[in-house]
Image (tube, rainbow, N blue to C red):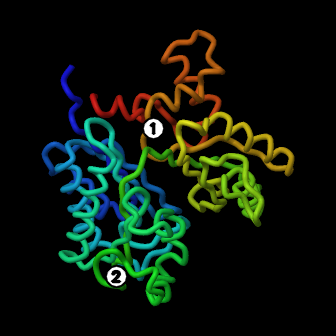
Amino acid sequence: MPAPTPLVECIVNVSEGRDAATLSAIAGAIEAVDGCRLLHQDSGVGAHRTVFTFAGAPDAVFEAAYRVYKVAKEEIDMRQHEGEHPRIGAVDVCPFVPISGIKLEEVVARTQVLGELLGQGLGIPVYLYEASASAPHRKNLADIRRGEYEGLAAKVKDPDWQPDYGPALNERFGATVLGARPFLIAWNINLAPEVPLATAKALAARLRGSGSKGQPGLFPGLKAIGWHIEEFGRCQISCNVVDTDKTDLARVYLTAVNLAEGMGARVTGSELIGLVPEKYLRKAGKAFCFDGSREGELEAAVEVLGLSDLKPFDWRERVLEGRMVD
């Protein structure tokens, strides 16, 4: 059997969700690279953030990522940026995920090369995280991003928080976090419009693995915060599923529904950001599908997770494997 073709996915999070010209320029930069395919673009006006998902041959994907940084450096001024999503720079976080034919360690090495190029060539402060982290305290994105863009000047006065590459400060761009990691699912659970932010934050604390005030939460493979999105006129529990094999979406969702009811609140559905491997959606729908078919499980997942709550959701457009071949 021939070795699988090396394939890497990049899910770059850009701190721009409103300016169509800037987003078009970034998408065009990705699509201009041979061997790289833009799979999905997901913008949030309230979050003021766009997630671009692209994949292809390793050389092509890393070249496309570099071009994204060049456009963002030219077009995005973080001194003017306001949005609901935590962020540290114009390109906030840029993870690379090995899909096939390449080891995580090889992707780590490539992130180090990219970090040096960005730091020296573009003057961007770069922090490496996850598998690429240069020290244990830099592994967690939330720890690097704590204080956000506004807190960078104070943060870099601490020698433990000097960037891995580039200058200590770039006021216009901010800083960026990049690295190699396993697959992560970005996903938001929607609350009814009348539910206050305090309830969203309390629910997030109960669900996420880190919990709150020394008390662990219910799902070790889940990170979550509560926020209000003006665009939707409601609060959400914004989730990152970081242990995708051990954290079932349906179980998290139904737990959130029950917890919310116990607090006199209501969950209305959820919102998937970007693309998801088929197996995780099928797993979420399996217990709710009566015919055991692939399509039945996927349709059941859309229904049980309420994925069409805010806008129509077509699993055919959001399953990673399908977008790679269509």
Residue 123 placement: quadrant? bottom left
Residue depicted at x 40% and y 56%: 131
Q: Position of residue 144 (x, y in %)?
A: 48, 71
Report whether residue 18 is seen: no
On screen, 160 above or below 220? below
The residue sitting at the top extreme is 291
In the image, is 132 to the left or to the right of 58? right
Q: Which of marks 2 and 1 precedes in the sequence?
A: 2
Question: Which image quarter: residue 40?
Answer: top left
Mark 2: amino acid: Arg
Residue at x 20%, y 77% (from the top left corner):
120
Relative horizontal placement of residue 147, taking residue 109 as reference (left or right): right
Per the rendering, the mark at residue 172 is 2
**Which element is circle 1 on?**
loop
| Residue with the mark numbered 1 | 276
Q: Locate the N terminus and report the quarter of the image it occupies.
A: top left
The crowding category of the residue bearing disc 1, from other C-alpha atoms within 10 Å (few below 14, some 14 to 19, many at least 20), is: some
Residue sitting at x 53%, y 48%: 242
Percent of width and height locating residue 46: 53, 62
Q: Residue at x 33, y 43 (%)?
A: 98
Q: Residue 97: percent from the left, percent from the top?
A: 35, 47
Q: Nearer the viewer, residue 64 or 316?
A: 64
Q: 202 or 304, which lies in front?
A: 202
Callout 1 amino acid: Val
Numbered disc 2: secondary structure: loop
